[in-house]
Amino acid sequence: MAEDRSFVVMAKPVGSRCNMHCDYCYYLEKGQYSEHERQTRMSYELLEKLIKETICSQEGPVVSFVWHGGEPTIAGLDFYKKVVELERKYLPAGWQVWNNLQTNGFMMNDLWCDFLKENHFDVGVSFDGSARVHDANRHDLKGGGTQARIARSIQRLRAHGIEPDILCTVNVKSCEDPLEVYRAIKETGAAWCQFIPIVVRTEEGGFTKESVTPEGYGQFLSTIFDEWVRHDLGKIDVQLFAETARIMAGGEASLCWMAKTCGRALIAEEDGAIYSCDHFVDDAHRLGMLQKAELGEMANSDFQIAFGNAKKENLTQECKDCLFLQYCNGGCPKDRFGVSADGEAGQYYLCVGLKAFFAHAIPVLEQVMKMSRGGKTPVEIMAALR
């Protein structure tokens, strides 16, 4: 079987610029790497080259673009109308394009919703649950809370027939009451959510006050899992729970941090710079400039292939011996700064918490899958587990 060389482009049309200020944001500082003295919007010339070369570099029949930031809606509706126009221009007959807009929801009015619905964009909205938790970290530019406004944006999207994915961080504040966070997400009516751990290191080698601890992360996941599996099975998909079940059933992880290798999600910055990964936007991981090099060549360069393969090649012995290796494959390389039980550097920082979650959830998921194979409905399964 030929090696799969497909990749996803995560485009940052306005770089790290944003219309909110979140205390735990790791991307604001990335503007320092821009070729522009002040980050602007990606030019239409660069946009066309990005879309054309992304499509031409794929085997098809599906091509994926993620529009990210900073805050991608700052680029304006006309920019995304141009995106759709260019995709139609270069997409071969019979192929499909998958667009995903990951937004803070701050500017999500009816015009945006109409456009996104008409052009079949998937939408991910950053939302940390309850006002107490969300507003502790996710502020407008004047320092005010944004939870109520973003909750309205989620409802507006749903009213237009768009079912947004909820992107919820796991931080110190959310770990105080996991069910408060989860139930606030459920109140939006969303059918899918993803939990993203906040781990941000300081220059001194410590962690920011918002960063989650390994133990807190594991407890957060396990607490919500217990609620979900007994009350919400078949009603709301939680990404990590679904991925774990997929792997248990013999499938492969679709998330880069859980997969054996990574490096297939490239970053395209507003100035044309291409980077290895969203968490490695720095000079050492700049693959080149779109103005000077072919995107497909950068995606499949020796450097990028080695970057992705390092995930499986640099496992600690503790990881190699772990019962749960197939589920996380050593975790995200950006967080491999811990020390294993036998003193080996390069252990996934959140390992203890993730192990605790897998040990807690997998036996229950085995019961769920067995009952499902036996013909029981989600309602019957939930009742049996209570």
Image (cartoon, grey):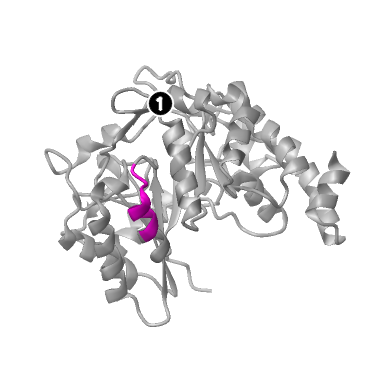
Inspect this view and state whether residue 8 appears: no
Residue at the location (85% across, 42% down)? Answer: 385
Horizontal placement of 171 versus 228: left or right?
Answer: left
- Residue 203 is drawn in which quadrant? top left
Q: Is residue 350 above or below residue 124?
A: above
In the image, what residue occupies the spot 38% across and 59% down?
114
Across and down, in percent, residue 176 comes to: 60, 21
Q: Position of residue 227 (x, y in %)?
A: 72, 36
Q: Is residue 383 left or right of residue 22?
A: right
Amino acid type of the residue tagged 1 in the rendering: Gly
Q: Is residue 111 magenta?
A: yes
Residue under circle 1?
A: 145
Furthest residue toward bottom: 93
Is residue 121 shown to the viewer in this render? yes
- Magenta residues? 107-114
Q: Nearer the viewer, residue 96 or 164?
A: 164
Pick whichever, 16 or 252, lies toward us. Answer: 16
Residue 351 against residue 203 in the figure, above or below: below
Judge left or right: residue 165 versus residue 36.
right
* The one of 17 and 199 positioned closer to us in this rendering: 17
Q: Quadrant of the C terminus?
A: top right
